[in-house]
Amino acid sequence: MTSAGAPERSGTTRGGGTLYRGDLGMWSWVAHRITGVLTFFFLFTHVLDTALVRVSPNAYDAVIETYKNPIVNLFEVGLVGAVLYHALNGIRVMLVDFWEKGAKYQRAMLWTVLGVWIAVMIPGAYFMLVRTISELVGGH
Amino acid sequence: MSLALDKPRSPRRPSARRSNGELYSWLFMRLSGLLLVILVLGHLFIMNILDGGIHRINFGFVAGRWASPFWQFWDLAMLWLAQIHGGNGVRTIINDYARKDATRFWLKMLLYVSMVLIISLGTFVIFTFDPNISN
C-alpha cells in the first residue's frame, strides 16, 4: 500500500524549491488527519445520542444534559475548533489541487487558515462558554 | 509537455488489475468536503453558538426542527456525506498505518460495520421520528 497523502515537495526545483515534508505543510497534513479522526469518532457517539429521540424525550434530555456540563463544554470548544480547522484546511487542499497557483501559495494559504481560525474561534469560544462561566462565577 | 517515457526497469502492471477506485475516492473527498463545509459549519453555528447554543437544546427543540422537511433533508445529507467522507478518510489511514494484512482487513471490517450501523440508525431515526412519543 502506498501512502495516500502528503506530496513531498510543493516546489519543482531541487535547490530553491520549498520543502513540504518536515516543514509547516507536513504539520498541516498531520493536523488534518488528527482532527478528521477525532471528528469521525465524535460523529459515531453523536448519532447514537441523537437516536435517543426515538426512545423517549426523557432519555434524550438526560443525555443532552451531560453536554451542558462545564468540562464537556470545553470539549465542545475543542470539537468546534477541530472541525473548523479541518474545514478551512480542506478548502486549502482543494485550492492546492485545483487552482493553478495553489501549490505556489500553499504556505500563505496555511497562514490564512490559521488567521481565520483564530478570528472565528475567539468570538465562537466566547459564545459557547459565556453561560457556563457566568454560572460558575455568578452561581445562578 | 515533456515526452512520456517509461522509467527503465519499471515493472509493467497488467492493465486488468488497475481500477480508478482511488481516483473516485480522491474526487469524492473534495466534492463531499465542499458540501460538508456548508452543512457542518452551518450545523455547528446553529446548534453550538447561536441563541444560547447547546443550552437550549432538548427534545422539543429537535421536534421543532424536524417538523421542517428542509432540516430533515439537511441532517440526512449531512449524516450520509459525513459518514462516507469520514469513513473513507479512516480507511486511508488504516491502509497507511496497519502493518499486517490481517490487521488491515479486520480494522476495515470494523470500520465498514460501524458505518453501516450509524448510517442505518441515523436514517431510520430521521424518517420515523415521532414528536408525540410518550415519556
Image: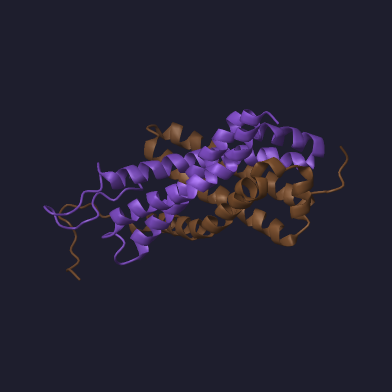
Chain colours: A purple, B brown
Q: Residue at x 58, y 38 (%)?
A: A129
Quadrant housing residue B53: top right
Q: In this view, does B80 lie to the left or right of A64?
A: left
Give coordinates of residue B54: x percent, y percent: 66, 42
Work out whether residue A62 or residue B36 is closer to the camera in this orientation and state it. Answer: A62
Q: In this view, does B118 lie to the left or right of B68?
A: left
The N terminus of chain B, quarter of image = bottom left
Quadrant housing residue A62: top right
Residue A109 drawn above or below residue B61: below
Work out whether residue A51 or residue A123 is closer to the camera in this orientation and state it. Answer: A123
Give coordinates of residue A115: x percent, y percent: 39, 51
Give coordinates of residue A85: x percent, y percent: 45, 47
Work out whether residue A140 or residue B60 is closer to the camera in this orientation and state it. Answer: A140
Q: Is residue B2 left or right of residue B102?
A: left
Q: Can residue A98 be seen in this view?
A: yes
Q: Residue at x 57, y 52 (%)?
A: B40
